[in-house]
Amino acid sequence: MTERLHSFFAGRWRDASGPEYTTEYPHDGSAVASLNATTADDVHEAVEFAERARLQPAWAGLKPHERAGMLYRMAQGIRERAEDLARLQRLDNGKPVKECRALVASAAGTFQFFAAAAETWEDAVTPSRGDFLSMSVHEPLGVVGAITPWNSPIASEAQKIAPALAAGCAVLIKPAEITPRMALELARIAQQAGVPDGIVSVLPGKGSVAGDALVRHPLVKRIAFTGGTNVGLGIQRLAAEKLMPTSLELGGKSPTIVCADADLDHAVAGVLFGIFSSSGESCIAGSRAFVHQSVYEEFKRRLIEGVRRLKVGNPASEDTQMGPLVNLGHRASVERYVALGLEEGGRLLVGGQRPQGAAFEAGSYYLPTVIEGLPNHARMCQEEIFGPVLALLPWQDEADLLAQCNDNVYGLASGIWSRDYKTAWRIGRALEAGTVWINTYKLFSISTPFSGLKMSGYGQEKGRQGILHYTRQKSFYWGMNESPLPWAGQ
């Protein structure tokens, strides 16, 4: 049965004003939920209400530890509903249920972390340079927007909502059109935690409508965006017209490097996890594997064996490692890239097709795929596929390796497999990437800042300093002089 969803904005649970649409379960294409899309008028109403709500004593008058209390309660509310939230995210985007549980746990940890950061934040009394006391304080920016992707909704939304609330802002969430559920559930949990109505709103629907209106609205003082690079560039252009700060987490084509001295058991497992977990639908996916020539054939053999052991199947199953891609249209895009790679001269080692059998026919499944024989400048090695497709490339000279790794418009993440800490450090410092994993991959901490270089983004998320991105800084000077200022001739 298709569930009916209502939006939450301007302090009420209600239908948005736009056309009705349905979301589908990627496993079998069945309709999961129906709701109305947000219009530009809805966005305007939500922003205006949020601006009024954030100025009320019920929010503006709270001490940091009181806001922190609400965030702690949100963390607890997420944990109390963890299994249900994991199920709902699985229905939204088809991720395996184990991965959904991990993302829900991550979201709870994010709210807990920023609650602690909020109530322990200290402004500064700055060193005096005269007969005055000087200090610097941080104040909330106001109404901010969060535009989130479909691949890991609850984690991405938590990373934007939590620091915004910790700073004292009102936040309007524009979730991906096809995955609105997690944002709506977080709004419900916020309401139950005591966050005043209007401080959190959810605006589902098309990015070209709701997202555009949110970015353009003069009362919106910041946008945090995770998604495609082209959309991010458009947001940045609009933000420049308002002198509005942004954080943009965009695309990636991350290299993973296997050195001659690597522990191949660890390296193979890490490369498999780096590209094929989340069905490759991850901006940080390690989609280019550079393997030293001396271990290339052995690594390839083990990698192919590992790929063939991966469990592709129903995301509701506890032993599934790879579920379906998010929809049929996205699968078609991945298939086009694989065909392009073969046209460019690549050799298919494993995968490259849809899985066979009745269990897969209705869903948007695609097998984990490895292609070798392509130069790094091939389109398949340069462009983000956002699917379970790995390009395998040999290397021998370190300088040439680094040149190839960095020869890409993206600079989001990277991985290095080596037993030699000096080698790993030297290569890691030379890589143009915001995150470097050494002898591991795709591990995260909310306490560690995350950012991209080049066309992978701008600004940071996570880390205790993440609160600062939702504040403006104000300086105070308290005169301590006993005599009047001498300039006036007193």
Image: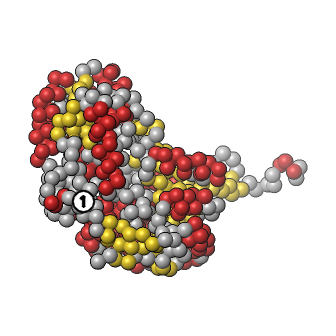
Look at mark 1 in the image and give the residue it sits on: 363
Q: Is residue 39 above or below residue 420?
A: below
> What is the basis of the colouring in this image?
secondary structure
The residue lying at 34 percent from left, 77 percent from top is 3
- The vertical placement of 56 against 384, above or below, is below
Q: Nearer the viewer, residue 413 or 125?
A: 413
192 up-or-down from 180: above or below: below
Q: Quadrant of residue 102?
A: bottom left
The answer to whether one can see residue 45 in this image is yes
Q: Position of residue 282 (x, y in %)?
A: 33, 49
- Give residue 98's quadrant in the image: bottom left
Question: Which quadrant of the figure contains the N terminus?
Answer: bottom left
Residue at horizontal 38 percent and vertical 69 percent from the top: 22
Point 11% across, 47% down: residue: 309
Q: Position of residue 381 (x, y in %)?
A: 33, 34
Give the image location of residue 358, x and y in percent: 15, 60
Query: Which residue is found at the position 40% from the left and 32% from the top?
Result: 408
Q: Is residue 467 visible?
A: no
Question: Number of callouts in the render?
Answer: 1
Q: Residue furthest right?
A: 489
What amino acid does circle 1 point to? Gly
